[in-house]
Image (tube, rainbow, N blue to C red):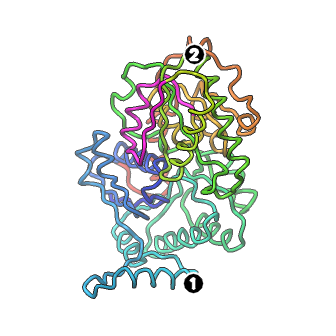
Amino acid sequence: MKVAIFGSYNGGSIGDTAILLGLISSVFRVLGDDVEITVLALGTLGINSELEELGGRQRVKRVKEVAIYRKVDYSFLGVEKFLNKGWRVLRRLRGRVQVNERRIRSVLNNSDVLLVGGGNLVMDLYKNWPKLLKLVCSVSKDVGVPYSFIGVGSAPINTLQGKNDLLYSLKSAKSVYFRDLTSKKYTEDHLGFEKSAVGPDLAFGIDSPQLTQADKENVLMLNLAAVYSRQWPVKDPDKYDNYLSNMVVVVDRLVESLSIKELVIFNTNYPLDETAAEDFIKKYKSSSNLSVSLNFIRGRNTVSRLLDICSKAKFSLVTRLHAGIISKISGAHVLAIEYQPKVKDVLENQTSHTIVESLDAVLSGIAFETVDQDYYNDIRSERNCVSHGEVDELIRLVFKESAAKVI
């Protein structure tokens, strides 16, 4: 079988890469190692390197990524950069998405089924995204390839054009599975689309052999989304400063109550959250009175490396949803901050023993006040979350609903 995958896969978000790896891993488990997978990519993913690091070397030749951004080769004239920039500007002025439709059509013509997901795809925060989604779905429909939405989130949806394009894409799908109940309800309220269900986040499907067998140390992993920063969609310098200041308070509170010896900061959205981490470190060093070792894992790391690092830690304090999922898969005890509803919805319903506090609780300095070592004494440090089997069952159901042959 030949499976095409499309989503917001651009190489910047480690969370999106984790979703893709979980989806690919599950497809292989369901269909066997003879399946061929093509990822319609919005940037350079290096997905085969990621698979190889996770122990999937035998699968590398069965997976390829195809860049769908439109790019014209004028290098022989020495004006490639100028003309491609001009092309992008022209397309932007015309309100058209900057992708190679012919390449998309070629991939889908050679596929049996298209899986759209996961990640936060049902939204119009970026105005051209619904157009791109509609284009891919339209081509799939035109060439007779069934497609399904799987493991997706939604919101915000604010524009009339965005609503129309998103609704078109959803209505033509064989099936639609959201990753959380909040997204399903939001889509019902804002688009009037009700033919959907809820399934697990696809990142839980990642194959990660032996990672959770590492000895756990008194280490607290820390992940900081750049909430309210100058790079955030909603900017508020005062709230950003308050957020960082109170994160220092929260971290100190957990260092004391959980007897933490080392603090390790990591990001799952590069480079956006790297700045937040740097700003936090400055504030922490200037205002914390506790003596704890502090390390910062800089840059864009592979999912495999983060799984390995998190597997050595007892605890992980996260804002990003997939920082929490990666930590949970690795066997760490997760404490999460609900900066968006999906964090609470997914982590409370698809994992166990995860403590979630609101962003307001952080901003008011009261988050995680009751957390102490006694809470964790009777909880085994292991994978307490959605199983591979649950993800595979969803994939199997989607193939059945798409009338695709499942081995």
Marks counted in the figure total 2
Query: For residue 301: magenta?
Result: yes
Examine the rendered structure and indicate whether residue 351 appears above or below residue 269.
Answer: above
392 and 283: which one is in front?
283
Examine the rendered structure and indicate whether residue 121 appears above or below residue 320.
Answer: below
- Judge from the rendering whether residue 18 lies leftward or rightward of residue 185; answer left or right: left
| Residue pictured at 65% horizontal, 20% vertical | 371
Q: Please identify, in this view, whether the residue under mark 1 or under mark 2 is nearer the observer.
A: 1
Query: Mark 1 or 2 closer to N-term?
Result: 1
What x and y, as percent, mark residue 291? 53, 21
Q: CA distance from mark 1 to mark 2?
A: 56 Å
What x and y, as percent, mark residue 404? 41, 57
Amino acid type at mark 2: Tyr
**Residue linked to disc 2:** 376
- Judge from the rendering whether residue 349 lies leftward or rightward of residue 139; answer left or right: right
**Residue linked to disc 1:** 93
Amino acid type at mark 1: Leu
Q: Residues within 10 Å of mark 1 (few under 14, many from 20)?
A: few
Q: Where are the magenta residues, as a range?
A: 293-317
What x and y, as percent, mark residue 191? 71, 63
